[in-house]
Image (tube, rainbow, N blue to C red):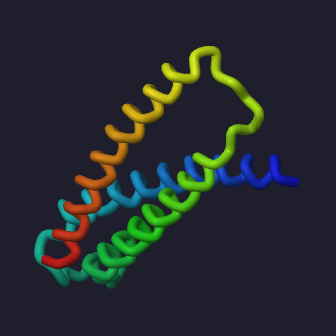
Amino acid sequence: MRSWFFIINYFAHDFFSAFWLACFIVLVILRQSAGVPGQVSADGVLATDLLHLFFWLQTISLGLIAVTGYLRSKDTGGREAQDPNKAKQFLIIKHAVLGLFFLAGTVVSILWYLS
């Protein structure tokens, strides 16, 4: 049972990472196409409402990335890397780079949300 939990958790971690990125891309597109805040689109949907919706979806995704990432870090799965130090170093570098990307994107999104 425990192995199924971690498999689902790995999927959720990767899924919400991709979902965060998709929300950020949608926010960029909406910001460029919205023009004036509060502008009504052809469908009658307020662009600012969509911006707020995707901001909150992105924020929730970031929280779920953190939670599933924490749970993922607790799983060794009985696997031993050929060079554990090299694998650990790679994971630290990868998460530092991705963390900076997520941090920068979240700061930009918050600034957009507040404007």
Residue at position x 47%, y 33% in the image: 91
Query: Is 75 rendered above or below residue 113?
Result: above
Q: Nearer the viewer, residue 80 or 5?
A: 80
Residue located farthest toward the right when viewing the structure as drawn: 1
Q: In the image, is 14 to the left or to the right of 104?
A: right
Image quadrant in which the C terminus is located: bottom left
> x, y percentage for residue 2?
82, 52
On the image, the x and y values in percent for residue 78 come to: 77, 33
Q: Is residue 89 above or below residue 38?
A: above
Observer-nearest of 6 and 55: 6
Q: Quadrant of residue 44?
A: bottom left
Q: Quadrant of the N terminus?
A: bottom right
Residue at the spot 55% in from the left edge and 54% down from the top edge: 70
Is residue 29 something that shows in the picture? no
Q: Position of residue 8 (x, y in %)?
A: 72, 52
33 vs 12, left or right, is left
Q: Residue at x 72, y 50 (%)?
A: 6
Is residue 46 rendered to the left or right of residue 21?
A: left
Does residue 44 sit above or below 8 in this rendering? below
